[in-house]
Amino acid sequence: MAAFLSFNPAEFLNTLISLSVALLLGTLIGAERQYRQRTAGLRTNALVALGAAAFVDLGLRLNGQVGATQVLAYIASGVGFLGAGVIIKDGANITGINTAATIWCSAVTGAFAGADHEAEAALMAVFTLIGNMFLRPLVHRIERAPLDERATEAIYRLHVTVTQTRRDALRDLMVEKLEAANYPVRDIEELERGDEEVELIAILTSTSVDPKELDAVAADLGKISGVEHVSWTAQTSE
């Protein structure tokens, strides 16, 4: 009975508009993610926006601006945990960061709608779509630009796959040749490659190298008995 007595048609209509706008904008953001076959797609982003709008709207109705502000703080931390769930780390590769950021933006979009700022919610959704769609060609262009290893600070790794019986000897020889070329080794990691082979990964302390010099070291190591494969990689530091 109390529910019928407390029913306010004007507030109900306001909530309906806020939730509808949040669901629509969250769906638009999620549709782009779904098209890209990302982990968090259409339904996830739509529900995140809808949930954020509902929480802010409820806080606003129960305790005014103070209630909405308090709810926003919890939404920010809660969505952070949700976004962390879509980030996947596989060795040195990390994926899902952009998807996590999109979930964050969907939550802000919904929060705008729940706070009765539908125009700002639409603006946030448009900016999110611009970031995901129209900045993609710029990212690809930057990634295709040639990397000057001599001018770029990076973490360099020399990968040498050797037989198990020659592991210790080649490990020492690997360090010796790198230090002779003035590339001291910070650490060496080992990865088992089946029962007969192991990959030695020398992490260099240098922040920049001359590619030709590192190629020469790799070529020398490749000629040694027991060495199956040699290569080097560079990971630019942030």
Image (spheres, grey):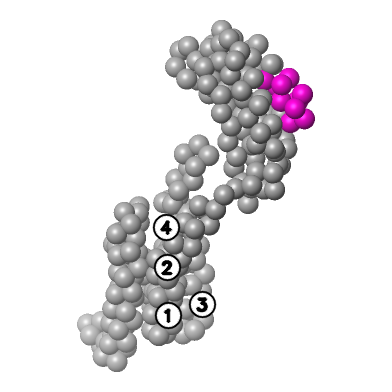
Circle 2: residue type: Phe
Q: Any magenta on residue 181?
A: yes
Write down the residue under mark 3. Answer: 69
Hey, which residue is sitting farthest bottom in the picture?
Answer: 10
Alpha carbon of mark 1 to alpha carbon of mark 2: how far? 15 Å
Mark 4, other Cα within 10 Å: few <14 / some 14–19 / many ≥20:
many
Circle 1: residue type: Leu
Asked if disc 4 and disc 3 are in contact, CB closer than 8 Å, the reply is: no
Front residue of 143/130: it is: 143
Task: Write down the region rendered in magenta.
Answer: 174-183
Q: Position of residue 92 (x, y in %)?
A: 53, 39
Mark 2 or mark 3: name the one nearer the start of the chain: 3
Q: Any magenta on residue 81?
A: no
Q: Which mark is residue 99?
A: 4
Write down the residue under mark 1. Answer: 123
Between tags 4 and 3, which lies in front? Answer: 4
Mark 4 or mark 3: name the one nearer the start of the chain: 3
Query: In this rendering, would 183 be left or right of 57?
Result: right
Mark 2, other Cα within 10 Å: few <14 / some 14–19 / many ≥20:
few
Quadrant containing the N terminus is bottom left
Between tags 2 and 3, which lies in front? Answer: 2
Write down the residue under mark 2. Answer: 134
Query: In this rendering, would 106 be left or right of 175?
Result: left
Q: Position of residue 187 (x, y in %)?
A: 68, 29
